[in-house]
Image (cartoon, coloured by chain):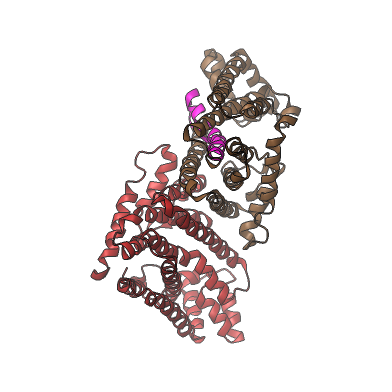
Chain colours: A red, B brown
Amino acid sequence: MPTHLTEISNYAAQVDDKLNSLLQSRTPTGLYEPISYTLSLGGKRLRPALCMLASRLFCGDASHALNPAIGIELFHNFTLLHDDIMDNSPIRRGQPTVFVKWNINTGILSGDAMIVIAYEHLINIEPTLIPQVLTAFNKTALEVCEGQQLDLDFEVLDSVSIPDYIHMVTLKTAVLLAASLKIGALVGGAAIEQAEHLYEYGLNLGIAFQLQDDILDVFGEPDKVGKQAGGDIIANKKTFLYLKSLELASIENREELIDWYSGPTYDVAEKVSKVKALFESANVLYHAEAEKTMYYNNALQHLTALDNIETSILKDFAEALMKREV
Amino acid sequence: MPTHLTEISNYAAQVDDKLNSLLQSRTPTGLYEPISYTLSLGGKRLRPALCMLASRLFCGDASHALNPAIGIELFHNFTLLHDDIMDNSPIRRGQPTVFVKWNINTGILSGDAMIVIAYEHLINIEPTLIPQVLTAFNKTALEVCEGQQLDLDFEVLDSVSIPDYIHMVTLKTAVLLAASLKIGALVGGAAIEQAEHLYEYGLNLGIAFQLQDDILDVFGEPDKVGKQAGGDIIANKKTFLYLKSLELASIENREELIDWYSGPTYDVAEKVSKVKALFESANVLYHAEAEKTMYYNNALQHLTALDNIETSILKDFAEALMKREV
């Protein structure tokens, strides 16, 4: 992380420390060990770190937001745990996922306990703030479930529009980043409108980040991105690149693209290279970059409305996030 | 339900009405239809009805507790939905379970949404009461998860003691009944100690009810009980009857009992009748009745501490519940 963002990495480290000692020696171990395991796999802890930063921006003290930040990270990991079962993903952060290391029942039940523990931490704040914070959180948590459902629906839908796709990633990814900032702001004593501007900053940044993710999957350097190039193509993921290509391609190319995403794949490398060529011939990178930049600029625009607040760190964070430096 | 308990059945009907219209036309339907389906399967709605009754006992108005009552019933149905997956149960209330009618992913995700909706309703109360109510609820929700884990653990454990068993059913079944009453009391303005007496009444009654359930499975009249006689025996459930028999039986009988619960069963009717005979020779019905009566009396004892409150309806309810009239 760039040095001027060490404040954020410090919060992330605090959250990580607390998560690692959270459930020590709780019983039954069959329930709590898989949760501790999930939490020990790490992660950047960006959502809770931003939650704490938002609190500090409004009241000078990040620690007010430590408990809700932990709650948000627990909720996030709960969704990952259950999503891994639904997506049949064997590996998370280089380690076996819970349902692989244990079994599906353990994955379901430990996840369920995890969301309850998330709520325990979310309400461990100044009591008068609980109604506002929980109302924001509940709305977001339900939206995340809706986003996951839409993602599952899209796998089997023939026709998904770009607005449908943006709506899905907004719910599945962006709202939790947004709510992390909003909840931190509320705990730090922000007025509703200020908290809403931070929410919109997070929402737009989250969408821009997802579009960047779609782009890097195909056009990034695998070493830098840290995952298999073309992974979304191999998985037939209906990303922005795919959907926009369907819109823009010639009839012939569109049919070829649909074919690549339908039948069985015998040569994965060939599929990736052919689909990438189809994306390129539709000039889809240009459109994806334009869409990403629009959301990115929207995010920064919401910072300008917070004129008494030192938002430069959030501007720097947005920049570093898009460069994958955080 | 006996006529003097119509107040409770009226609350149950109110809850049922509200649940049936709760999620109309919410999208994505893939997420919400399985929830509506689960809620449409009915159930006695005893927990939410008791929650409302508790409120009425303290403030004369049950409606204060309608929202948390709905939240509690949603949580209860969330646990059933996920438990059905874990227990691989194809049928619930005569209808296919969600994971059978749809699939496991739908069962997981709709359940997840359901617990969030439960929290939405739980906080829809007088704001100053939210911290107390949610603290009680979170504790209980986590205990229910622990109880389910213990139940799964016991399936593969060789040695389970009677106190282990009572602890498991307390968590899995009794605490939610207890918390329903406590939360209703808190919403109705009860003092903490009063709410705790109602909690203990519910806790002890819940344990007594579970012991009654164990007894009726083997010694009840199938027509009256409404389920297959000896279902617990067929499923190798380590109930009070089984565990107490292991304690009391002769070495020879104990080995025979363990044998029946270990190997494959070729003749189910023979198994039920042989195991029942082993239970009878250990005189286990006497001990189960004594244990049940102890918890039942404990429950009623906690009502006597509520001297300014008209608790006769709770006494009548306890009696009717044990006779399976409610």
Magenta stretch encompasses residue B181? yes
Q: Compared to A120, does B28 lie above or below? A: below
User: For this rendering, which residue is in front, A203 or A155?
Assistant: A203
Task: Give the quarter of the figure containing the C terminus of chain B.
Answer: top right
Magenta span of residues: B157-185
Q: Position of residue B269 (x, y in %)?
A: 70, 26
Describe residue A81's horizontal placement relative to residue B212 as left or right: left
Describe residue A125's horizontal placement relative to residue A151 as left or right: left
Q: Is residue A235 visible?
A: no
User: For this rendering, which residue is in front, A323 or B28?
Assistant: B28
Q: Position of residue A211 (x, y in %)?
A: 45, 74
Q: Compared to A325, does B61 lie above or below? A: above
User: For this rendering, which residue is in front, B209 or A23?
Assistant: B209
Q: Position of residue A92 (x, y in %)?
A: 41, 57
Main secondary structure along the magenta-highlighted residues:
helix
Task: Give the quarter of the figure containing the N terminus of chain B.
Answer: top right
Q: Is residue B126 visible?
A: yes
| Residue drawn 66% across the image and 26% down it | B316
User: For this rendering, which residue is in front, B273 or A267?
Assistant: B273
Q: Compared to A121, does B267 lie above or below? A: above
Describe residue A43's horizontal placement relative to residue A260 as left or right: left
| Residue drawn 50% across the image and 50% down it | B127
Q: Compared to B258, does A30 lie above or below? A: below
Magenta stretch encompasses residue B104? no
- In this rendering, the count of numbered labels is 0
Q: Position of residue A160 (x, y in %)?
A: 60, 73
* Quadrant housing residue B106: bottom right
